[in-house]
Image (tube, rainbow, N blue to C red):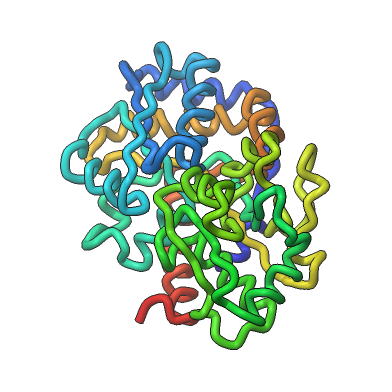
Amino acid sequence: MLLNLSRQMVIGGVVGIAAIATASTASAQFRPSATECIAPAGVGGGWDFTCRSVGKALSDLDLVPGQVAVTNLSGGGGGVAFASVVSGRGDDNDLLVAASTATVTRLAQGLYADATADQVRWVGSLGADFGIIGVAVDSEIQSLSELMDMVIADPSSVAFAGGSAAGGFDHLKILQVAVAAGMDDVTQVKYVAFDGGGEAVTQLVGGFVQAFSGDISEATGFIRSGDMRVIAVLSEVRLPGEFDNIATAREQGLDVVSPNWRGFYTPVGASQASFDYWSEALKTIAASSEWQEVMTNNGLMPFAKSGADFQSFIDQQLVDIETLSRDIGIID
């Protein structure tokens, strides 16, 4: 199930000889020429973070020539980018597209028009980004339980901003918290959708909404700048490093765990050699000391899957999210 994703997490290590040898074998068959990574939202969101952080790792580890070009292609909660790849970039060997649980959620709910998950190939993931609930730094709200008491007393008094469409992953997080808080009719929760987490946080900081639902990587810069205060992380235990002062929802009496994997898909018509290359490249990055530092600095937990293993995971997640969405009335 969606909420059990964190139980499947694996512990990363250092780059090993076997990983390098496998990547070298794939390199003999295919070598990217000018790599592009599409972030299906604006600058500052989770997909943008995925492209830029992994793009830097690809360059630093000499897995691609030069720098990775990042293209921000927002619209439709990732649907514009998905359609663009399917219709116009279907055989591009040098293209990666940032994806996450939010991407699979929209596909499972039919929010990308007639698009289906098998129109692309799911190449791999490198980490999991736990959900958070945040407020502006000057907000009077001090805890998740206090916030949910306000929502239950008067749902119209609190607007949540998120970087996914209504019914998307950021919205589902809030509904899960509302269910855990004992709210009878979660459809009363006021959720305002924006096209990416960065835009949603900007609305929070500007005072247009009272709370934010997103992921820790989207919030990191705003936490450090002093614009946002996170009142709960939706993880089983507290995050490591600088985020260990953030209480979990469980600590506040609300049993909700909501991780969001970070990874990529590639065009369905790209060569098998390129798909194998990117699968092995992501494995190499996931095992590197450089990536361990990225995860630590951004509150990510290890979640490395590639190739056929990742495809099987995606297939099951699609079923689980569709079931969950039907159970809470998001889809018929």
Q: Position of residue 186 (x, y in %)?
A: 54, 80
The residue lying toward the viewer, choosing from 304 and 210, is 210
- Asked if 97 appears above or below 145 in the picture, the reply is above
Residue 315 seen in the current view: no
User: Residue visible at 61% across and 59% down?
Assistant: 211
Q: Which quadrant: the C terminus?
A: bottom left
- Asked if 3 appears above or below 117 in the picture, the reply is below
Q: Quadrant of residue 71?
A: top left
User: Residue visible at 64% across and 71% down?
Assistant: 177
Q: Which quadrant: the N terminus?
A: bottom right
Q: Position of residue 302 (x, y in %)?
A: 65, 42
Query: So how many labels did they put on this image?
Result: 0
Q: Position of residue 56 (x, y in %)?
A: 51, 22
Outermost residue, bottom side? 184
Q: Is residue 59 left or right of residue 90?
A: right
Q: Position of residue 31 (x, y in %)?
A: 35, 18
Q: Is residue 120 left or right of residue 293?
A: left
Outermost residue, top side? 66
User: Residue visible at 31% across and 16% down?
Assistant: 33
Residue 19 seen in the current view: yes
The residue lying toward the viewer, choosing from 264 and 269, is 264
